[in-house]
């Protein structure tokens, strides 16, 4: 009797969960097409990473922060002077793009295995944090393309360009 009374509630909760009404269904991606090395007057190597955030669920969420803990690489907070909003709201079924500066402190120290990026977000149910590991990037060579961890692809391109701008 109690089980049959609870079943409809469990069914509704499961439907809301899988629809993205309770937790967002988020896809993250970053590309290397617009990457270029920037060295400031203090000799700090960085680049601007363009990130696409897609919400495949019903409920909107607001991205409040992104970070990663890995040797040789770190994200900087949004820079309001460069028109980078500190928070980005992504509505259900929509996508948004954002830019973040990435400082490369040691090209050789960045891990070769794919590393996650930590995303902090807020929904109507509260604030949460999740991690995502982006898909492999591809290094192009005359013989064949080779998959590499996203952070190694980023560092390989930016560090090579910093050493040899004609790269």
Image: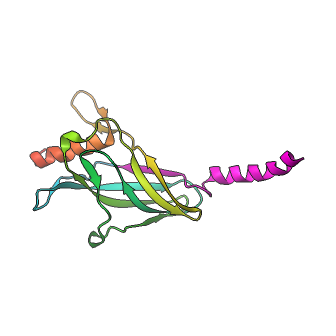
Q: Inspect this view and state whether residue 130 appears.
A: yes
Q: Where residue 93 sits in the image (x, y, percent)?
A: 54, 58
- In the image, 75: left or right of 120? left
Farthest residue toward the top?
Answer: 143
Q: Where residue 84 sits in the image (x, y, percent)?
A: 32, 67
Q: Where residue 19 sits in the image (x, y, percent)?
A: 63, 53
Farthest residue toward the bottom?
Answer: 81
Q: Where residue 162 sits in the image (x, y, percent)?
A: 13, 49
Residue range in magenta is 1-30
Q: Quadrant of the C terminus?
A: top left
Kindly identify the residue that appears in the image at 77 percent across and 53 percent down.
9
Q: How many marks?
A: 0
> For the stretch drawn in magenta, what is the main secondary structure?
helix
Kindly identify the residue that appears in the image at 28 percent across and 48 percent down.
32
Q: Nearer the viewer, residue 67 or 134?
A: 67
Q: How is the image coloured?
A: rainbow
Q: Quadrant of residue 111?
A: top left
The answer to whether 57 is drawn above or below residue 111 in the figure is below
The answer to whether 139 is drawn above or below residue 34 in the figure is above
Q: Nearer the viewer, residue 78 or 68?
A: 68
Q: Inspect this view and state whether residue 61 appears.
A: no
Q: Is residue 53 magenta?
A: no
Kindly identify the residue that appears in the image at 19 percent across and 39 percent down.
108
- In the image, 58: left or right of 11? left
């Amino acid at each position: 009797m109690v089980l049959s009374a609870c079943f409809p509630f469990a069914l509704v909760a499961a439907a809301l969960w899988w629809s993205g009404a309770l937790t967002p269904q988020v896809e993250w991606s970053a590309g290397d097409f617009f990457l270029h090395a920037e060295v400031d007057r203090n000799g700090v190597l960085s680049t601007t990473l363009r990130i696409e955030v897609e919400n495949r669920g019903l409920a909107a969420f607001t991205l409040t922060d992104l970070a990663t803990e890995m040797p040789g690489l770190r994200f900087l907070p949004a820079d309001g002077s460069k028109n980078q909003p500190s928070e980005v709201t992504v509505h259900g079924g929509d996508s948004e793009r954002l830019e973040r500066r990435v400082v490369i402190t040691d090209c050789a120290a960045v891990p070769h295995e794919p590393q996650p990026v930590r995303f902090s977000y807020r929904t109507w149910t509260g604030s949460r944090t999740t991690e995502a590991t982006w898909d492999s990037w591809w290094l192009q060579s005359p013989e064949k393309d080779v998959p590499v961890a996203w952070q190694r692809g980023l560092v390989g391109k930016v560090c090579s360009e910093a050493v040899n701008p004609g790269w």
